[in-house]
Structure formats: C-alpha cells, structure tokens
Amino acid sequence: MSPEPRELRADARENRLRILAVATDVIEQQGTMASLNEIARRAGVGPGTLYRHFPTRESLLAEVLATWVARVRETAESAPVGTREDLVDWLGRLAGIASGYRGLAASMAASMNDESSPLRHAHRASLEANDLVFQRAREAGLIEHPVDSGTVARLVTGVAMIAEQAHLPPEQVRDMLQVVLDGLIAHRG
Amino acid sequence: MSPEPRELRADARENRLRILAVATDVIEQQGTMASLNEIARRAGVGPGTLYRHFPTRESLLAEVLATWVARVRETAESAPVGTREDLVDWLGRLAGIASGYRGLAASMAASMNDESSPLRHAHRASLEANDLVFQRAREAGLIEHPVDSGTVARLVTGVAMIAEQAHLPPEQVRDMLQVVLDGLIAHRG
DNA sequence: ACCTGAACACCGTTCAAGT
DNA sequence: ACCTGAACACCGTTCAAGT
C-alpha cells in the first residue's frame, strides 16, 4: 500500500530523509503552505531534488503527517465516552488535531473527495478514529441513532477551518461543536 | 459610515469605477484570490493606481460585494419559514451566498474577528439576515430556544468553506446542514 | 541514477519619476 | 493630485548540464 521504494542510492536516501526532517520543522512553523524552495534550501538541496522525491506538495505533506496519524488513533482509543461532555471534548480534540498545522484542515479538506490524493491515508485514519469513538458511544447508550462518520468528519473539519481562518476563541469553537453534537444526537438519518 | 471620498479628480474617478467593474468580472471568474496585477492590467491602469484606490485586497472585495449584500437581505426577507425543511433550505441558500465567489467564505471568515476589516459590513449583513429568518421561525413556533446568530453564521461559513475546498456534492452539504439545524433546534444555550 | 542551479513565468508591493 | 511602470523580493516548477 505504501509506495516504499525498494532501493535508493545512498546519497538519495540521505537527501530524502533530510528533506523530510526539514519539512516537518518548516511546516510546523509556517503551515502547510510553506515555501517549497525554502525547504529545499534549508535541507541543502536544489529545488529539483525536492521535486524528484516529492512531486507534489501533498505527497510531501502526507509523509510529514505519519506521526500525526498515529496520534489520531491513540487519542481515539483513549477517549472517554461516558457523558455527553466527553463527546464534545472528543470533537474538540479531533478539531484540534485537524488543525495541528496551519492550513492542515484546508489541505485535508481538499483531499476528501479525491481518490488519488496522497493524504487519503491521513483522512481515512481520522475517519476510522471517529468511527471508533462513536461506536463506543453507542454501546454506552449515549447515542441512539447511527451517525454517518463522513458527515461528522466534514463538520469537524469545517469547524477547524473557520476556527483557524477567523482566529476564533476556544469558547466559540466549543459552542459550534455543542450544536453539532446536539444535531448528531437528535438527527435520525 | 461608508468612506465615500468627497471629491475625486475626473480621471481618478473613472479609473476607480473601471477597476471596480473589471475586478467584479475577474473575481467572479477566478475567485477572491485573483491576481491584483491582472485586474490592474485589464483595467488599463498601473498596479500603483489600483493600490492607491484600494490599499488592500479586502477593501477592493468589500466594494465588489455591494450588490451581493443587497441580495442577502432580499433572500432573507422572502425566505419561507413554515416548515423545518424551509429552514434547511435557508441555511443552504445562506451557504450558497457565502460561497458566491470562489474563496469568498474564507475571506469572510478571515474578517470575522477583525473589527477593522472592510468586509465587516458584508459580514454584518449576513448576520442580520440570519437573525431575521430565525426570528420569524421562532414566531412561527418552529424554534423554541433562542439561537446565537454568531454561532449559526460560523457554522454555515464553515460548511461553505469545506464544501468549496472538498468539492462536496450538494447532497453531502445538505446532510451537514440538516445536522446543524437539528442541533440548533435541540440546543438550549 | 541522481543532483545542481539557472531560468521562466508568475506573484504582491513599492516608489521615483512624470503629468 | 494622480498615474506610470520599472524594480524588488519572492513564488512554483522545469530542465539542461553535470557527477
């Protein structure tokens, strides 16, 4: 599934790893729209080398998100689902993760209905994480009707996008998520 | 309130109007992130002239949105509020208006918590439009608890942002708005 | 096979020089 | 008072030339 290249020349392999390390730093600081030329420069390679290893911005971002994906799973597995507030907290954490880097929510959104996006893996991971939590919430009797996790993911990503763009205070974000959760509980598909 | 300049030299006035006309066209086609240099070029002026009349992209966009603002009001005034589906339709129309141009929802979002943004007027207009509709919905007995129109506006703008970014089909957008409306109805502030 | 880095066609933004 | 348009410092992306 992952396109791990079988063998890479020693210098190429080193360059690839260095680009990835630098990209992680720069994207953490400047967001997903950080300059690719700057990443190449800081990694000590020519722009062409970056493009050879990562033909698109998304393909670079997908690898940077590797540890991010792991964190989504862990957060879901350890999320309490005892009360309604627990679920709001979960949605809040999901939104927080979705905007782990500046511009990330928008990048994820752009990949949602794109089968061939390199970010598909990251997107699926957050879908599955959400499924897990809501499944457990149903078993706990907190939620009656099944919810479409695609709709949940879209709503949470939308909340994350506007929270970042409008610099919303956490309280306003929580208000939005309260409404979303009430809707999910009340809604019958 | 609007900063109508008292007197403008004849040539300046003509340039200003021509820039505005061209900007409306170009932004309609290419979205709110359209190249300002291209707008200046197509309007037959130097880039500096555009910057003189519109020191920021937002200030240009704010004027382009003049007719847009009028449409928001009209839509709100004529919106039926008889059934729950009417309200979903209204949210859908609001989301549609919020993404009247590509990138518009994001531009509006960026202005939301910025007191000095030139887009503040457009933002207030959509807030008031939404208040009007929900006020009538309450009088019609469709909604019991008061809703914070700020929260509604944020949610709808978030939906509009992700709908555009992810190229969501209308059906998925409607699903999101159904959940939002259910949440608004069920929620007690 | 892989890398370099100049080159291309763009951005937004500024500002001296003109009228 | 207003306009021009060259100039600056950037983008993303490509591709001949090197090793």
Image (cartoon, coloured by chain):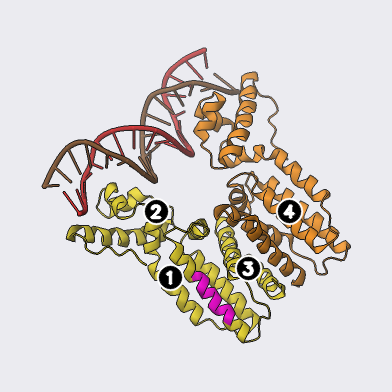
Chain colours: A orange, B yellow, C brown, D red
The earlier-in-sequence mark between 1 and 3 is: 1
Q: Which residue is mark 2?
A: B57
x and y percentages locating residue B148 in the rendered image: 61, 70
Up the image or down, A162 lies above or below C4; here it is: below
SS at badge 2: helix
Q: Residue A127 shows which numbered tag? A: 4
Residue B134 falls within the magenta-colored stretch:
yes
Q: Which residue is mark 3?
A: B171
Query: Are the residues at dot 4 and dot 3 in contact (C-beta closer than 8 Å)?
Result: no
Up the image or down, B75 lies above or below B109; here it is: below
Badge 1: chain ID: B
Up the image or down, A132 lies above or below C1; here it is: below
Badge 4: chain ID: A
Q: Which residue is mark 1?
A: B69
Same chain shared by disc 1 and disc 4: no
Q: State which mark lies toward you, 3 or 2.
A: 2
Cα distance between the residues tagged 3 and 2: 33 Å
Magenta range is: B126-135
The kind of residue on which mark 4 rests is Leu
Badge 2: chain ID: B
In the shown orientation, is residue A87 left or right of residue B83? right
Query: Are the residues at dot 4 and dot 2 in contact (C-beta closer than 8 Å)?
Result: no
Cα distance between the residues tagged 4 and 2: 37 Å
Badge 3: residue crowd in 10 Å (few <14, some 14–19, many ≥20): few
For the stretch drawn in magenta, what is the main secondary structure? helix
Badge 1: residue crowd in 10 Å (few <14, some 14–19, many ≥20): many
Cα distance between the residues tagged 1 and 4: 37 Å
Query: Residue at the spot x=51%, y=32% of the render?
Result: A38
The kind of residue on which mark 2 rests is Arg
Query: Residue at the spot x=61%, y=33% of the render?
Result: A25
